[in-house]
């Protein structure tokens, strides 16, 4: 990151520079590159309303940092435009989600997390993009973000025309569905912004109807406290009993709303080797995964996003899935082996699972 004292200037016409940025982005593996301005006033009001209703649950970081999340120039002084990129992540060799959730003895992990941690992949590519821009025009103020700071990335992507925020609150693209990552490059360059696209959800409500825990409480409104992705990743304590059965075999995230979205018939598989399934993370056996000690967990999840939840919550989530699995000798033995685990959190969820099998 560089941060010169004065906004950058360039002798190249803005249109030519933007064309070059798009070309460099494609060469670096991004499927799309677009430009957004920094006026997020409408989204700021929506964020305030969401926070006031406590729909963010324990994600206190969503309410932190003052207005830096919705006002890019406060987060990175001098920001005048944002380069927004997207990168497809759905691996071609992975078990389809719709098949996996029907296999109660298997672990269903959100498809974005079964390969290398996307933060590292996108951050590296965005830094290379910034370097190419700098090589062409000289030093300029910029900062790279990949879901790593207070950034409203979906609103920025919507403003840049990369898609629209659907009823499930994910970004949708008519040519690519929603199986993609987003990244941002805040710049002090006065680049011309792209035009947003209109909403194409229409009367469809498949995502709302399929949600196992009814987390999409209304079109375009998500109560994170009910969302399986929140419950298995963000929540640090006990998973509310009312949601455990509905979680099924989903142990890290949930893709159901994406799975049923009609626009994902146009989704493209990723050509990135980094996003291919690692170890036993695609369709691993619940009993086997539950048997991992902490050293094995750290080894098998090295370089993935899954590592962030730690071994204790990994066991918590798996205990719930085993409670929802068919009653077998192997399942009962696995749970009983953890019944006296040092963690009260793990013991509680194991006890619940064992009670389900009695």
Image: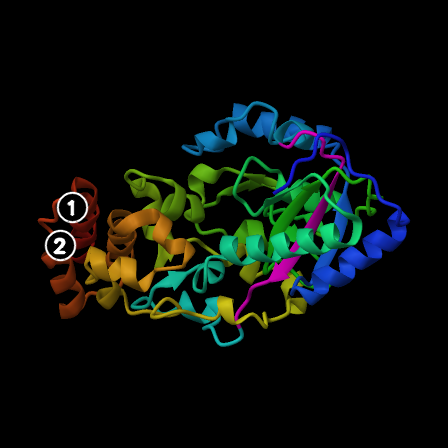
Q: Tell me, what colour scheme is on the image?
A: rainbow
The stretch drawn in magenta includes residue 186: no
From this view, report whether residue 185 is shown above or below residue 225. Answer: below
Residue 25 relative to residue 255: left or right: right
Span highlighted in magenta in the image:
76-91
Residue at numbered disc 1: 347
Residue 34 relative to residue 329: left or right: right
Q: Are marks 1 and 2 in contact (CB under 8 Å)?
A: yes
Q: Secondary structure at mark 1?
A: helix
Q: Secondary structure at mark 2?
A: loop
Residue 121 relative to residue 309: left or right: right
Badge 2 crowding class, 10 Å Cα cut-off, few under 14, some 14 to 19, many 20 or more, is some
Q: Position of residue 252 (x, y in %)?
A: 39, 54
Q: Position of residue 229 (x, y in %)?
A: 44, 48
Mark toward the start of the polypeptide (1 vs 2) = 2
Q: Which mark is residue 338?
A: 2
Res. 291 image quadrant: bottom left
Query: Is 190 in front, or is 2?
Result: 2
Identify the residue at image location x=54%, y=62%. Answer: 259
Query: Is 140 in front, or is 83?
Result: 140
């Amino acid at each position: 990151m560089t941060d010169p004292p004065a906004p950058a200037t360039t002798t190249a016409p803005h249109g030519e520079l933007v064309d070059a940025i798009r070309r460099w982005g494609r060469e670096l593996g991004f499927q799309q590159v677009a430009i957004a301005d920094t006026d997020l006033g409408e989204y700021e009001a929506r964020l305030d309303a969401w926070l006031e209703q406590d729909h963010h649950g324990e994600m206190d970081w969503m309410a932190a940092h003052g207005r830096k999340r919705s006002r890019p120039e406060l987060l990175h002084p001098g920001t005048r435009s944002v380069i927004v990129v997207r990168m497809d992540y759905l691996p071609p060799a992975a078990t389809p989600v719709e098949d996996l959730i029907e296999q109660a003895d298997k672990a269903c992990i959100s498809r974005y997390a079964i390969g290398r941690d996307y933060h590292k992949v996108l951050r590296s590519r965005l830094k290379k993009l910034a370097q190419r821009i700098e090589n062409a025009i000289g030093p300029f103020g910029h900062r790279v973000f990949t879901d790593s700071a207070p950034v409203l990335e979906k609103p920025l992507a919507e403003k840049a025309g990369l898609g629209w925020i659907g009823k499930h609150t994910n970004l949708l693209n008519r040519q690519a569905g929603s199986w993609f990552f987003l990244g941002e490059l805040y710049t002090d360059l006065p680049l011309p912004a792209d035009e947003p696209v209109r909403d194409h959800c229409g009367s469809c409500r498949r995502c709302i109807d399929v949600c196992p825990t009814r987390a999409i409480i209304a079109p375009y409104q998500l109560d994170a406290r009910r969302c399986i992705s929140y419950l298995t990743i963000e929540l640090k304590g006990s998973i509310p009993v009312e949601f455990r059965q509905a979680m099924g075999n989903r142990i890290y995230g949930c893709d159901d709303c994406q799975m049923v979205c009609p626009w994902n018939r146009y989704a493209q598989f990723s050509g990135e080797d980094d996003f291919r399934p690692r170890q036993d993370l695609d369709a691993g056996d619940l009993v086997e995964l539950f048997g991992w000690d902490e050293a094995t967990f750290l080894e098998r999840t090295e370089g993935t996003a899954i590592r962030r939840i730690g071994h204790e919550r990994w066991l918590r989530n798996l205990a719930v899935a085993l409670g929802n699995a068919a009653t077998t000798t192997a399942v009962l033995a696995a749970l009983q082996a953890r019944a006296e685990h040092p963690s009260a959190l793990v013991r509680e969820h194991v006890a619940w699972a064992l009670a389900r099998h009695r």
